[in-house]
Image (cartoon, rainbow, N blue to C red):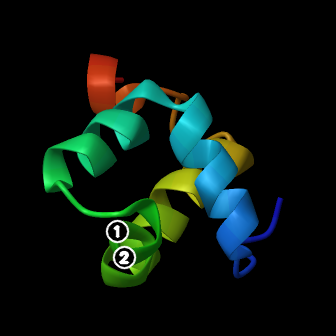
Amino acid sequence: MKNDKLTISAIDEHIDNDEGLYDWWKGAHQSKRQFIRDNREQLEQCINGVRCGDVRAHSLKYGC
């Protein structure tokens, strides 16, 4: 899969379904919308890494 720019709703869904991303968001103590705005580039890198198969899902929580 390509490293496409993700929609806000796609990023939101990934945060809800990946324990590492979810914990990162909760630890930031921000609304999800603000968290996505502040960290969009890093979130897209993490999500696209999983989508391309370069990184395992939940790797932020459990490692590779």
Q: Alpha-carbon neighbours of circle 2 within 10 Å: few (<14), some, or many (≥20)?
A: few
Q: Quadrant of the C terminus?
A: top left
**Type of the residue with mark 2:** Gln
| Front residue of this view, candidates 23 and 58 | 23
Is residue 62 placed above or below 50 in the rendered structure? above
Q: Alpha-carbon neighbours of circle 1 within 10 Å: few (<14), some, or many (≥20)?
A: some
Give the secondary structure at mark 2: helix
Give the secondary structure at mark 1: helix
Identify the residue at horizontal 16%, vertical 44% (top origin).
27
Is residue 64 placed above or below 24 in the rendered structure? above
Whole-percent x and y of residue 30?
25, 62
Residue 35, which numbered label? 1
Q: Which residue is mark 2?
A: 34
Whole-percent x and y of residue 44?
53, 68
Identify the residue at horizontal 26%, vertical 42% (top origin).
26
Query: Horizontal placement of 5 versus 29: left or right?
Result: right
Q: Quadrant of the N terminus?
A: bottom right
Q: Residue furthest top?
A: 62
Q: Cβ–Cβ below 8 Å for labels 2 and 1?
A: yes
Whole-percent x and y of residue 48?
62, 59
For residue 57, say whether it is visible: yes
